[in-house]
Image (cartoon, grey):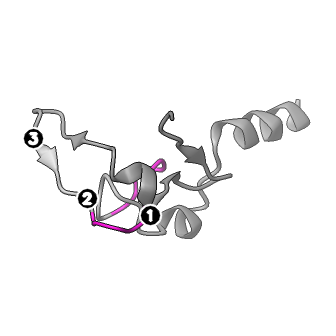
């Protein structure tokens, strides 16, 4: 069964605990990033998290909008 990553609208990338158990996450140098066992994980998409690569909710505080919403907003202004 494939690993499922769900893109939250204007939020993080979400991975279920079941799928996270199959996941190996590494940093830019190839070092293994430990994942919490038995828990869903959310990966930051906005770049503002203080817990990168994990989401800490900063996207809502900074008004992050995902690419689709940003494009739709730009198209509406044109």
What residue span does the magenta drawing correspond to? Answer: 36-49
- Specify few, some or many for label 3: CA neighbours under 10 Å numbering under 14, 14-19, or 20 or more: few
Q: What residue is pinned by disc 3?
A: 31
Res 43 seen here? no
Q: What residue is pinned by disc 1?
A: 40
Q: Main secondary structure of the magenta part?
A: loop
Are dots 2 and 1 in contact, CB under 8 Å? no
In the rendered structure, find residue 6 and report the number of the disc placed on it. none
Quadrant position of residue 18: bottom left
* Residue 17 placement (x, y as % from top left): 43, 60
* Residue 57 placement (x, y as % from top left): 48, 69
* Label 2 residue SS: loop
Please say if 76 is above or below 40: above
Quadrant position of residue 28: top left
Please say if 73 is above or below 46: above
The numbered mark, 1 or 3, whose residue comes first in the sequence reads 3
Front tag of 2 and 3: 2
| Residue at the spot 30% in from the left edge and 64% down from the top edge | 50
Quarter containing the C terminus = top right
Measured in 3D between alpha carbons, the distance from the residue under mark 2 to the one under mark 3, in whole angstroms, is 13 Å
Measured in 3D between alpha carbons, the distance from the residue under mark 1 to the one under mark 3, in whole angstroms, is 21 Å
Quadrant position of residue 71: top right
Task: Answer with left or right where residue 56 lies relative to residue 5.
Answer: left
- Specify few, some or many for label 1: CA neighbours under 10 Å numbering under 14, 14-19, or 20 or more: some
Please say if 28 is above or below 60: above
Q: What residue is pinned by disc 2?
A: 35
């Amino acid at each position: 069964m494939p690993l499922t990553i769900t893109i939250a609208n204007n939020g993080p990338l979400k991975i279920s605990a079941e799928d996270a158990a199959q996941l190996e996450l590494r940093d830019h140098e190839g070092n293994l990033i430990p994942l919490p066992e038995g828990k869903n994980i959310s990966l930051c998409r906005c770049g503002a998290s203080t817990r990168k690569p994990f989401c800490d909710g900063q996207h809502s505080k900074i008004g992050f909008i995902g690419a689709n919403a940003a494009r739709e907003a730009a198209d509406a202004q044109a």
